[in-house]
Image: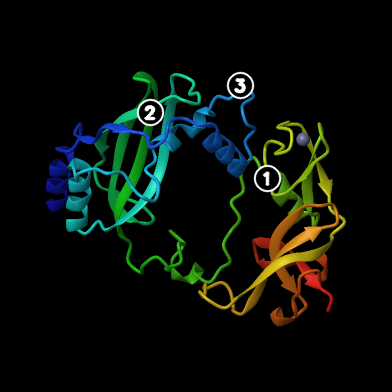
Amino acid sequence: MSEDVLHESLREYEGRPAAVSARGKDPVNEPMIRHWCEALGHPVPPDGSAPATMLQVWTMAGLSGQARRAGPYDALLGALEGAGYTSVVATDCEQEYVRELHPGDEITFDAVIESVSPRKATKLGTGYFVTTRMDIRAGGERAGTHRFRILKYRPAEGGRNAAPDAGSGRSASGRRPRPVVNRDNAGFWEGVARHKLLFQRCEACATPRLPWLPGCHACGSSEWRAVESAGHGTVYSYVVMHHPAFPAFDPPYAVALVELGEGVRLVSNITGVPCEKVRIGMPVELEFLRVDDDLELPVFRGAV
Ligand code: ZN
């Protein structure tokens, strides 16, 4: 009832501007392209153009912010906050690329509040999805579109530390988190079920990789084969968790980044050694830990 009234009033913001004739802080430039490529492990385009997926970078205001007056977008968020939808999470973005960007291109853009969804129930809480569309130009020519969606929501009961064990109730809150198995990493978990720790080796350049990914980060090839690790490793780095407490874990415990003899690393637990004895460089051996009826994990036994 009152929520429907709220949605009706929120919809009045649709089509209203979120930014008008805004200007990118810097023209498209080589140093930003290089830093972005280095940070993301993306090859620098040989022709000096900006990777298309950098589109939003040229509109970002940086830490110093964009000089602007509060407008309809701030009013929309204020209305949601006033109604108790105080939290925000960015959910997704969609981009369309119309023209390549090159160093020297001056960027201008307009943004509009495209839509406000009806009220939705999500795992985080109930709220409204707000979609903003930014039309980006280079030297006055259309260069691309960036659609950005946020969820402005009222946090679910229990706060953010509540176990997100939707559908299974409190009895499940003490269970270890389940792995997210998808078509890219299913082979890894099939290996675990057979007590084998499998990593991928690129067929084109022989670079090993773990966690499993569809392509090689060294050469881009999508050809690979699975290789079984011999299971000998060393602790490359580690932390001892004291806080915060999670229901499925009993602090303090060590979380280690283990480097395997084959040159790949994975995050795991160290067993057989008190957490205060774990050290960088400590030799460890692979073993499989049955956590519960349907979860088994590769872990590493330390030798003091
Ligand atoms: Zn490769």
Give the mark nearest the N terminus, 2 or 3: 3
Secondary element at tag 3: loop
Q: Is residue 288 visible?
A: no
Q: Is residue 294 above or below residue 143?
A: below
Residue highlighted by disc 3: 47
For disc 2, the marked residue is: 107
In front: 292, or 222? 222
Residue 200 at x, y = what percent? 77, 43
Nearest to N terminus: mark 2 or mark 1: 2
Q: As shown in the figure, which amino acid type bears the numbered disc 3? A: Asp
In-front residue for pair 176/99: 99
> Residue at horizontal 38%, vertical 37%?
25
Q: Amino acid at mark 1?
A: Ala
Left or right for 21, reference 266? left
Instruction: Work out whether 211 lies above or below 260.
Output: above
Residue type, label 2:
Ile
Give me the C-alpha separation between circle 3 and circle 1. Answer: 38 Å
- Of circles 2 and 1, the one toward us is 2
Asked whether the residues under the numbered discs 3 and 1 touch, taking CB atoms below 8 Å apart as contact, a structural biologist would say no
- Callout 2 environment at 10 Å: few (<14), some (14 to 19), or many (20+)? many
Element at label 1: helix
Q: Quadrant of residue 117?
A: top left
Separation (CA) of disc 2 from disc 3:
20 Å
* 221 up-or-down from 159: above or below: above
Residue 33 screen position, x and y as percent: 55, 34
Location of residue 259 by image quarter: bottom right
Q: Which mark is residue 106?
A: none
Name the N-terminal-most of marks 3 and 1: 3
Assess disc 3: are there few (<14), some (14-19) or many (≥20) residues with their C-alpha within 10 Å of its C-alpha: few
